[in-house]
Image (cartoon, rainbow, N blue to C red):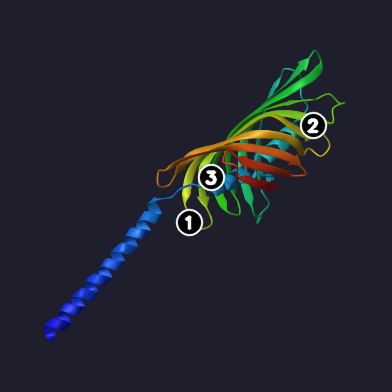
Amino acid sequence: MKNVKTTMVILLMASSLGLGLNSCKKDGVAATDVTVTEADAAELTTDAVTPTTGGFALQVNSSVTIYKTVVLSCGVKKDSTLTKTSAAGATPSYSYNLSWNYMLTCAGIVPSQLTFNFTGSHTFDGTRMSSNGSSTGGFVLTNLQPSASTYSLSTTFTHTGTETSKIARKYTFTSNLSITSSNILVDKTTLKIVSGSAAVKLTGSSSSGKSFSFAGTITFLGDNKATLLLNSGASYAIQW
């Protein structure tokens, strides 16, 4: 009888050990099989666009504000530093320190376009994702004549960073997101984007080493709204 009990105990211990090993194996697979999804790409793109996370729309507004408020001379390059942080306790929040240079080009003495370039650190903490990285961009502002009701912008905007998901799997990944457009229109009174579209491309790799690539188009609808249409056909609403 003693031998039978001893055998049963050994079998139970072996069974428990086997279950533990299987559980660890499953957990290990989950930890190393991280894949960045379309929904993640849409979330990052949204954060890279919205002003509440210091994104593309805020940089467009900053460029137009510079033209309206800074004294510019034809052919003279100017430099400045823009450091902005969202209000204390704000959600979402952002912080950036960007070095800007810009130059006004004129036809004779009549302004024809203002060219901007900027680069610097850019972090944000969105509702579902945070990012620690940098942003660079180049904008060309035209339609400067007083008779035009909107400014026209050709833009390149790139955000490179390390992102951390704040929901579900809470994993990290590295990314490079570019937003490129040639037809952004901005109202001269409100300084808001009223129309235009931009090509989006997102590449990077997850913490498990899996690379990813997504692409699509942002269509700006005015009234602080836009639509992101990925090449897969998935559509996401953006609002700020």
Residue appearing at x 54%, y 48% in the figure: 40
Task: Name the residue furthest right.
Answer: 147
Type of the residue with mark 3: Asn
Q: Residues within 10 Å of mark 1 (few under 14, many from 20)?
A: few
Q: On screen, 209 above or below 128?
A: above
Q: Which SS class for mark 3? A: strand
**Could you tell me if the residues under marks 3 and 1 are in contact, i.e. CB atoms within 8 Å?**
no
Q: Left or right: 110 with respect to 80? A: right
**Could you tell me if the residues under marks 1 and 2 are in contact, i.e. CB atoms within 8 Å?**
no
Quadrant for residue 156, please give it: top right
Number of the label disc, if any, that sits on residue 132:
3
Residue appearing at x 82%, y 17% in the figure: 110
Q: Residues within 10 Å of mark 3 (few under 14, many from 20)?
A: some
Q: Left or right: 147 with respect to 225? A: right
Mark 1 — residue? Answer: 169
Q: Left or right: 128 with respect to 35? A: right
Lower sequence index among marks 3 and 2: 2
Estimate the x, y position of residue 21 in percent, counting from the top left.
Answer: 29, 63
Task: Name the residue furthest bottom.
Answer: 1
Quadrant for residue 63, please give it: top right
Residue appearing at x 37%, y 59% in the figure: 27
Quadrant for residue 230, please give it: top right
Q: On screen, 147 above or below 121?
A: above
Type of the residue with mark 2: Lys
- Disc tally is 3
Lower sequence index among marks 3 and 1: 3
Mark 2 — residue? Answer: 68
Q: Which SS class for mark 1? A: loop
Estimate the x, y position of residue 159 in percent, counting from the top left.
Answer: 57, 38
Estimate the x, y position of residue 130 in percent, counting from the top left.
Answer: 55, 50
